[in-house]
């Protein structure tokens, strides 16, 4: 095995510095806005020293960011020795990390804009012991050929092959490996995914998060009075403004989805799923099948109408999840009838065509009755302050009841050997497939009114992310809930 010392590409210094500078943008923007943009480079101005101090601090921070990027690039080295990936870094405090290749779970690749300009890739090395959603080792920028060498060394160590190879041979061998593709998203499906994406909520919540950063300087009282005057103009203009806002948020969500899921492809190799995607930033996520804790099939109402679904896997450990989570989208958009044969091939021991035991009819009111606690005050406020148009809020009552009936018809479970399958919905229908050995805990809840009707709610949690992923089937027969609890007992 080669003991040649390898270094990061010089571009890694720029990338590291850019990350540090990016983290400084928001604090500086807050200071600038808080100060009311009162800056001046005129020596006689009262704001001169304040301006000098602020830009001086920012300049020192930028210089330190640049220096830290250069230092990391110059001090970071890695090599292969005794079946291990070895890393050494640090200027004053030298740190070393030795990772046996057989313990490496996955190598995840990212190609940002800087990476693609120079033909580089960022490599994240993950093991089963990776903590805090961080990879064990991150190689900020290396050549693609060098990344292939790492992957080949890992394969060779796991297969206990000791024949020495050079970089050219290793690259040719990697290219010769045939990796079967099990899913490739077409352009048509990509547009359907973007059109029906629920990312509009993410966009709006992101906007709220940004606004909250400036909560101390926003004149809420003045805005409230302006909105009150605006509402008096007419409900039509208020509704039109809300609709235009939602359309704008949907368009942003549409574009983000197109960029994130462009050229989405799933392949399988050596009991691992390899996911590649991205337009501006290309990503490659490697997910061992043995780390998958549960599988969710999600069908929002619009996609369910046309037979489409999204398949999500819950993974234990690692950093491959989207948004620093462990929820990895396996099939972003696929015909449900088409995904089942693929899942049966990947996980042959699972029953992918369950026959559910559903919630009893007498439990139906529990699916919508509690909603009136928050619904009635909203209807009362709308009817009083927005009369007569506010009376339209009364339509929320039948809509809530219909949604509750829909949720009741969906709720169900199935036990098949060592497999538990749950089905439930809030708006989207979720079918959660879990193996008994993967379930971390199962619990039940029963209110006084549920006890009177002899029904009970059941929850099951698997390891995923910081808090785990929990499936919840509300108000099933009490004896069915007790059956699930008995089934889970060791």
Image: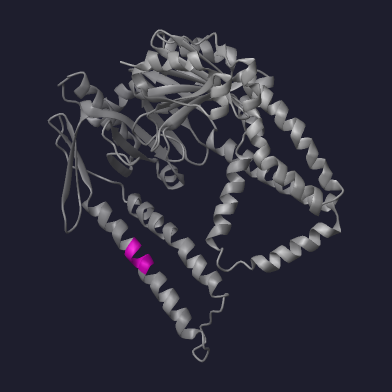
Percent from the top left, x then y, of residue 404? 66, 27
Percent from the top left, x then y, of residue 371? 65, 36
Q: Out of 41 and 343, give the one closest to the viewer.
A: 343
Q: How is the image coloured?
A: one colour
- Residue at image point 43% right, 10% down: 350
- Residue at image point 58% right, 41% down: 256
Residue 124 location, quadrant: top left
The residue sitting at the left extreme is: 82
Percent from the top left, x then y, of residue 466? 38, 38
Segment colored magenta: 61-65
- Residue at image point 80% right, 63% down: 229
The quarter of the rendered structure image containing the N terminus is top left
Q: Out of 117 and 451, give the one closest to the viewer.
A: 451
Q: Judge whether residue 187 can be spotted in this image.
A: no
The quarter of the rendered structure image containing the C terminus is top left
Percent from the top left, x then y, of residue 31? 49, 70
Q: Out of 175 and 411, give the one closest to the viewer.
A: 411
Does 223 appear in magenta?
no
Residue 418 location, quadrant: top left
Q: Please indicate whether residue 97 sits to the left or right of residue 329 in the image.
A: left
Q: Judge whether residue 170 can be spotted in this image.
A: yes
Classify 489 as above or below 241.
above
Q: Out of 304 and 37, give the one closest to the viewer.
A: 304
Q: Please indicate whether residue 26 sits to the left or right of residue 203 in the image.
A: left
The residue sitting at the bottom extreme is: 44
- Residue at image point 41% right, 38% down: 110
Provide the major secondary structure of the magenta segment: helix
Classify 376 as above or below 41.
above
Classify 405 as above or below 198.
above
């Amino acid at each position: 095995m080669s003991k040649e010392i390898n270094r990061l590409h010089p571009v890694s210094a720029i990338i590291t510095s850019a990350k540090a500078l990016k983290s400084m943008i928001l604090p500086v923007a807050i200071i600038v806005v808080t100060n009311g943009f009162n800056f001046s480079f005129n020596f006689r101005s009262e704001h001169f020293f304040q301006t000098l101090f602020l830009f001086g601090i920012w300049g020192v921070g930028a210089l330190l960011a640049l220096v830290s990027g250069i230092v990391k690039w110059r001090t970071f080295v890695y090599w292969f020795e005794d079946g291990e990936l070895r890393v050494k870094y640090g200027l004053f405090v030298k740190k070393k990390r030795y990772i046996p290749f057989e313990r490496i779970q996955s190598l995840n690749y990212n190609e940002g804009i800087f990476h693609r300009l120079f033909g580089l890739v960022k490599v994240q090395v993950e093991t089963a012991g990776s903590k805090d959603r961080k990879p064990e080792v991150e190689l900020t920028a290396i050549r693609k050929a060098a990344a292939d060498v790492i992957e080949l060394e890992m394969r060779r160590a796991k297969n206990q092959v000791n024949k020495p190879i050079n970089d050219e041979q290793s690259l040719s061998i990697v290219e010769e490996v045939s990796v079967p593709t099990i899913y490739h998203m077409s352009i048509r499906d990509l547009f359907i995914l973007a059109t029906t994406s629920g990312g509009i909520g993410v966009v709006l919540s992101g906007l709220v998060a940004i606004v909250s950063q400036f909560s101390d300087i926003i004149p809420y009282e003045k805005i409230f009075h302006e909105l009150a005057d605006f509402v008096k103009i007419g409900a039509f203009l208020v509704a039109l403004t809300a609709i235009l806002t939602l359309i704008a948020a949907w368009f942003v969500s549409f574009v983000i989805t197109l960029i994130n899921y462009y050229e989405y492809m799933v392949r399988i190799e050596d009991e691992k799923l390899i996911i590649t995607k991205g337009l501006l930033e290309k990503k490659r996520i490697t997910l061992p099948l043995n780390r998958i804790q549960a599988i969710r099939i999600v069908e929002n109402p619009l996609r369910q109408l046309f037979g489409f679904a999204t398949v999500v896997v819950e993974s234990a450990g690692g950093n491959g999840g989207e948004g620093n989570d462990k929820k990895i989208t396996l099939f972003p958009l696929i015909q449900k009838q088409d995904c089942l044969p693929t899942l049966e091939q990947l996980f042959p021991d699972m029953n992918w065509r369950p026959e559910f035991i559903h919630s009893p009819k007498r439990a139906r009111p529990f699916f919508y009755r509690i909603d009136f606690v928050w619904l009635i005050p909203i209807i009362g406020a709308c009817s009083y302050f927005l009369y007569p148009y506010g009376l339209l809020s009364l339509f929320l009552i039948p809509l809530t009841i219909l949604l509750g009936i829909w949720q009741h018809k969906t709720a169900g479970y199935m036990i098949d050997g060592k497999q538990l399958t749950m089905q439930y919905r809030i708006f989207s229908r979720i079918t959660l497939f879990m193996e008994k050995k993967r379930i971390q805990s199962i619990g039940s809840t029963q209110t006084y009114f549920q006890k009177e009707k002899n029904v009970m709610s059941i929850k099951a949690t698997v390891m995923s992310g910081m808090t785990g992923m929990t499936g919840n089937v509300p108000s099933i027969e009490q004896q069915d809930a007790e059956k699930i609890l008995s089934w889970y007992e060791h």
